[in-house]
Amino acid sequence: MTQSPTTEQVDVGNLSTDDLREMYKTMRLITVTGERAVVEVKAGRLKSAFYPVRGLEGSCAALGSAMQPNDQIVSTYRSLGDALAKRSSLRRIIAEIYGKAEGTSKGKGGAMHLHDQEAGFITSTGVVGAGLPIAVGLALAASIRDENRAVVATFGDGSTSIGAWHEAMNLAGLWKLPVVFVCQNNQWAEHTPISEYAAVTDLESRAQAYGMNTAKVDGFDPVRTAQVLSAATARARGGEGPSFVEVVTYRLTGHSGSSDYSYMPKDQLAAATERDPAPAFRKWLLDAEIVDEAALDEIDQQVAAEVDDAFEFAQNAPQPNASERYTDVFADERLVPKS
C-alpha cells in the first residue's frame, strides 16, 4: 500500500478549504452511519441486508467532490457511501433501509436497491456487475441528447471478471461515451482475495485494452483520488470519451454487516486499519494546518446529530400502505411506440 501524502507534499489542486471540509464530513457521515446500521442489524432492530462501506469512505468522498449535480451515478449493493457522496437525503436512505414509506424507493428497494432520481443517484443493483450496462445506457442517452453530464458506474474488483463488465467497457470505448468506470478495488470479491480469482490483478491494464483513458490511484489518499476523478468526469462532460479509474483500497470489515472476517490476513487488515480514511484525513488536515481541531470537532458533532436524527426518523416512519404494492412496479404507459 502506498502512503498518504505528508504535510510537505500538500497539493490540493482546485480543491478549496470548504471542499476539503465537505469531504471530511462525507467520510465521517459514511463511517458513523454504517457503524450505526451494523449495530442495528446485529441487535435485530434493523431487519435488512447491509453491506458496510468501511475502507471506501475516502474514495466515496472524493467521487462526491468530482461529480456535479447534473451528473448521474449507478452503484452496487455496497452503496451507502456513493449515495451520501451524491448528496442523497440521509433520512430517506435510512428510511429505505428500514423498508419505510418515506424511503428513497418508498420502502420497496431496501439497502441493495437504493434510488434517488432527484440526487442523480439512478440505482444500485444486487447483482455483481449489473450496473455497468445501465450506466452505459444512461451515457448513450446523454450523448444522443447532447446533455452535458458525466455518468459514473461504481463497482468492486470482482465485477471485472463478469461478462457485463467487458461488454459495457467495449461499447463505451467504441462509442466514446461520457461514462467513468470507477473500480472500488477493496481487494476482496466477497470472501475471495483478488490473487485467487484474477490471472492479472492489475485491473487498470485490463481496461486499457478497450481504448479508453485509464488511471490507478491510492484510495486512501482522498485528495489525489478527487483530482483523478475530477479529471475523468471533466473528460466525460467535454466529449473526450470514457475513463476507467482503479481506486485501490481495502475492506475493513466482513462482506456484510454480520459477516465474520477472520479469513482476512491480520497483517494486511492491521496495515489498512492504520489508514482508516476519516481519522487519517482528519490528522492530515490538522497537520497541514488546513482546518483546525475545533472546526473538525464541530463537524463530528453535526454528523452524530444527523445520524441520530435519521435513524429516529426512519424508525418512526410509517410502513408502506398495502395499496402501494404495485405502484412503480409496472409501467403505466408505453414509452416506445409500436412499429
Image (cartoon, grey):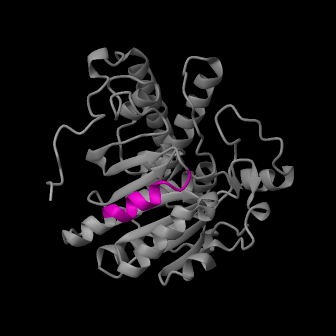
Q: Quadrant of the N terminus?
A: bottom right
In this view of the protein, can residue 224 be seen by the observer?
no
Q: Main secondary structure of the magenta part?
A: helix
At which x and y percent is residue 319?
36, 16
Residue 131 counted in the magenta span: yes
At which x and y percent is residue 122?
34, 50
At which x and y percent is residue 306?
42, 32
Q: Quadrant of the C terminus?
A: bottom left
User: Is 245 above or below relative to 102?
Assistant: below
Q: Is residue 107 left or right of residue 247?
A: left
- Residue 323 figure quarter: top left
State the residue lying farthest toward the front: 339
- Tell me the residue at 62%/46% (across/down): 54
Please give the count of numbered marks on the rendered protein. 0
In this view of the protein, can residue 159 be seen by the observer?
yes
Q: Is residue 105 left or right of residue 40?
A: left
Q: Is residue 147 left or right of residue 157?
A: left
- Tell me the residue at 36%/47% (across/down): 87
At which x and y percent is residue 187?
70, 58
Residue 268 counted in the magenta span: no
- Tell me the residue at 61%/30% (across/down): 38
In this view, the residue in front, 129 or 248, is 129
User: Is 18 above or below relative to 84?
Assistant: below
The stretch in magenta equals 128-138
- Residue 186 figure quarter: bottom right
